[in-house]
Image (tube, grey):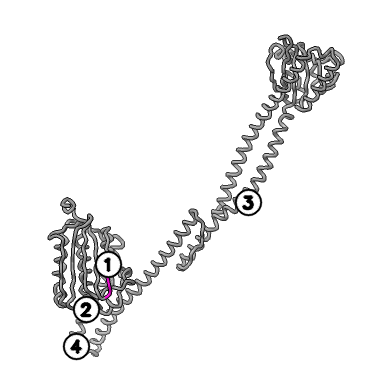
């Protein structure tokens, strides 16, 4: 049922909305109940105080027709304003005045049946509890319920407020305000109905807003989902166009960056396959051609040795390519673990020069070693760093013309050891410097001068230096030469000597 984020958001928002309205309604219902009752009591008490003040001032109202009439009019006004019955009662429980001449005319029959009538205009309470309490004190008395049976025939609770009036320091009687509780609570129901209407209107508006808000959230997520399906099918050109500045906008930006990275990765994969295919096809074609020529007699016996040497070279090239590919794959997958130890980097450079001595001599190259000190110890993987130096030195040999010069240097500075290999070779174009670290990348100049390289040497160097968490950079100018510089961590001994 709730199988989409849109539906879940709608359901959650509606649940929160309904829960909030229900809780608010319950709280308001009981709050209004107490509030209306308390306000009605305050109204009765205040009105009673005003009436008793008048009665206390004109205590002889019964003997004065004008004051009596004024009193009845006053009771009529207050009864209408407070929506209640108002009786003036003496200390013996006799109703001495209502807003009509005969009190029983203002008393409903259901109530009058529970009172004592001694004749026209002579009505009194039956139960002393209905008047003794207020007459024996000077305090306002509040009662709710059937008022000791007075309102039992109405089958509903009443609110009764008795306000005593005093003359010459003595209670002379009390003014009773009486009203059915349901009538009092009609105000609460009126307010509550208005509240429910406002809830209905606000709920309708909230549902509309929730719908569009949920749609605004779910729509970009659906767009990202559809784009992900397209990308999963191999179409990496798809992008999502979401401009919001919230988490969804950040997700869209990250999604597009991921797609770009996947597209680049796919391009690299295709390029890698194409390069591997090319690099393997060339020596395989040569090997197949020369071996086929020997087998079918196309190549005469006296040339066999010459062409077999070429086949041997091509086989060696294939072997180097496969080994480099395997090594690079292991480095990138983390299978090759570095073994750190302290060693003299200057001594390692000297060994590398000796290993390539024949090639240096053949090209009549000058070698210069600029060491800051005779011994310079570093903490690194010796085999990995030796491979870096050999590869960089081998590149310098390949691209430096006859009679050129190669300079190797090492120095300690700013808490690191810097190793540089600089040549006076053909150099690298500025546009190509950032590309030389890619697998199988070879500039046109390198292709014209070298047919034996695999194109993986610099990629391997970069991986080795990165695994050491160090840096390598290149400076080059066409026809003037190239300089590679990488950093290493000095040994503990070197740190102590600093």
Nearest to viewer (mark 2 / mark 4): 2
Mark 1 or mark 3, which is nearer the start of the sequence?
Answer: 3
Q: CA distance from mark 3 to mark 4?
A: 90 Å
Q: For residue 208, which numbered disc appears in the image?
A: 3
Nearest to viewer (mark 2 / mark 3): 3
> Is 267 situated above or below 68?
below
Asked if residue 407 shows in the view, the reply is yes
Q: CA distance from mark 1 to mark 2?
A: 31 Å
Asked if residue 339 shows in the view, the reply is no
Secondary structure under tag 3 reads helix
Judge from the rendering whether residue 124 lies leftward or rightward of residue 220; answer left or right.
right
Residue labelled with disc 2: 313
Q: Is residue 476 magenta?
A: yes
Q: Nearer the viewer, residue 437 or 322?
A: 437
Nearest to viewer (mark 1 / mark 2): 1
Q: CA distance from mark 1 to mark 4?
A: 45 Å
Secondary structure under tag 2 reads helix
Mark 2 or mark 1, which is nearer the start of the sequence?
Answer: 2
Residue labelled with disc 1: 474
Q: For residue 303, which numbered disc appears in the image?
A: 4
Mark 4 or mark 1, which is nearer the start of the sequence?
Answer: 4
Q: CA distance from mark 2 to mark 4?
A: 16 Å
């Amino acid at each position: 049922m709730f199988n989409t984020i849109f539906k879940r958001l709608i359901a959650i928002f509606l649940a929160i909305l309904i829960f909030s309205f229900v809780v608010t309604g319950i709280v308001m219902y009981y709050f209004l109940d107490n509030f209306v009752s308390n306000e009605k009591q305050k109204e009765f008490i205040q009105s009673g105080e005003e009436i008793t003040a008048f009665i206390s001032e004109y205590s002889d109202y019964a003997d004065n027709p004008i004051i009596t009439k004024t009193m009845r009019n006053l009771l009529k006004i207050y009864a209408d304003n407070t929506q209640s019955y108002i009786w003036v009662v003496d200390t013996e429980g006799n109703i001495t005045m209502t807003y009509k001449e005969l009190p029983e005319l203002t008393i409903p029959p259901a109530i009058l049946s529970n009172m004592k009538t001694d004749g026209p205009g002579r009505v009194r309470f039956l139960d002393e509890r209905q008047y003794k309490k207020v007459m024996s004190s000077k305090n306002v008395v509040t009662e709710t319920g059937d008022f000791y049976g007075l309102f039992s025939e109405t089958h509903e609770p009443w609110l009764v407020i008795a306000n005593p009036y005093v003359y010459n320091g003595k209670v002379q009687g009390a003014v009773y305000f009486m009203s059915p509780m349901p009538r009092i609570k009609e105000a609460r129901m009126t307010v509550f109905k208005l509240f429910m209407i406002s809830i209905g209107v606000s709920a309708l508006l909230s549902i509309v807003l929730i719908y569009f808000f949920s749609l605004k959230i779910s729509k970009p997520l659906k767009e990202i989902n559809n784009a992900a399906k397209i990308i999963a099918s191999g179409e990496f050109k798809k992008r999502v166009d979401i401009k919001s500045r919230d988490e969804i906008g950040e997700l869209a930006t990250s999604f597009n960056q991921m797609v770009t990275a996947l597209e680049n990765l796919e391009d690299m994969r295709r390029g890698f396959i194409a390069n591997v295919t090319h690099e393997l096809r060339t020596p395989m074609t040569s090997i197949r051609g020369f071996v086929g020529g020997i087998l079918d007699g196309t190549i005469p016996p006296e040339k066999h040795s010459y062409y077999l040497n070429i086949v041997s070279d091509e086989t060696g090239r294939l072997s180097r390519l496969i080994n480099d590919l395997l090594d690079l794959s292991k480095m990138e997958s983390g299978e090759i673990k570095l073994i750190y130890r302290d060693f003299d980097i200057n001594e390692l450079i000297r060994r590398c020069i000796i290993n390539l001595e024949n090639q240096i001599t053949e090209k009549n190259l000058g070698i210069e070693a600029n060491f800051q000190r005779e011994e310079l110890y570093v903490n690194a993987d010796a085999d990995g760093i030796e491979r870096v130096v050999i590869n960089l030195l081998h590149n310098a040999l390949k691209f430096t013309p006859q009679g050129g010069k190669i300079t190797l240097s090492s120095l300690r500075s700013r808490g690191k050891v810097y190793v540089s290999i600089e040549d006076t070779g053909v150099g690298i174009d500025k546009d190509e410097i950032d590309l030389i670290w890619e697998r199988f990348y070879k500039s046109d100049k390198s292709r014209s001068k070298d047919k034996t390289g695999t194109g993986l040497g610099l990629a391997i160097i970069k991986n080795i230096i990165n695994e050491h968490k160090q840096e390598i950079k290149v400076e080059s100018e066409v026809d003037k030469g190239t300089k590679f510089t990488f950093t290493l961590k000095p040994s503990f001994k070197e740190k102590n000597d600093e």
